[in-house]
Image (cartoon, helix red, strand yellow):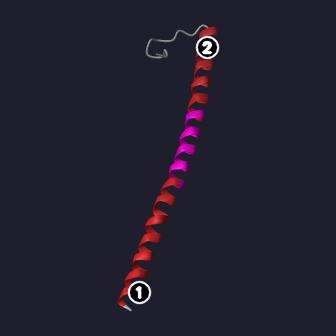
């Protein structure tokens, strides 16, 4: 009987350990998707800033070196 209980406990432990990597993979995939989304938003924001800077220059605004893009 003790062997059966030990085997059941070991099986439960193994099943729980198996769930952990699956959750981690799901979380990793979610983080990758969020990272890609944030990069897209950053690229869009950079494009808007570039366009606004061009508009300012076209309207005669003088931009300082600190305002210039690297």
> Which span of residues is magenta-colored?
26-40
Q: Label 2's element?
A: helix
Name which residue lies at 54% across and 44% down: 32
Question: Where is residue 35 drawn, in percent x and y?
Answer: 53, 41
The residue tagged 2 is 54
Out of 9 and 34, give the one closest to the viewer. 9
Magenta stretch mostly in which secondary structure?
Answer: helix
So how many labels did they put on this image?
2
Q: In this rendering, is residue 36 above or below 15?
A: above
Name which residue lies at 40% across and 81% down: 7
Comparing labels 2 and 1, the label whose residue is closer to the camera: 1
Out of 13 and 70, give the one closest to the viewer. 13
Out of 14 and 23, give the one closest to the viewer. 14
Circle 2: is it few (<14), some (14-19), or many (20+) Cα within 10 Å?
A: few
Image quadrant occupied by the N terminus = bottom left
Q: In this rendering, is residue 43 above or below 62?
A: below
Q: Are marks 2 and 1 in contact (CB under 8 Å)?
A: no
Upstream in the sequence, badge 2 or badge 1? 1
In the rendered structure, does residue 30 fall within the stretch colored magenta?
Answer: yes
Question: Where is residue 58 drawn, in percent x and y?
Answer: 63, 9
Name which residue lies at 59% across and 34% down: 41
Out of 52 and 38, give the one closest to the viewer. 38
The residue tagged 1 is 4
Question: Where is residue 42 drawn, in percent x and y?
Answer: 56, 32
Find the distance from the CA under tag 2 to the CA under tag 1. 75 Å
Res 40 quadrant in image: top right
């Amino acid at each position: 009987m003790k062997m059966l209980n030990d085997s059941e406990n070991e099986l439960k432990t193994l099943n729980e350990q198996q769930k952990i990597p699956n959750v981690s993979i799901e979380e990793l995939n979610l983080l990758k998707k969020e990272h890609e989304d944030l990069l897209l938003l950053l690229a869009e924001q950079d494009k808007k800033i570039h366009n606004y800077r061009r508009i300012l220059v076209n309207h005669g605004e003088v931009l300082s070196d600190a305002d210039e893009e690297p």
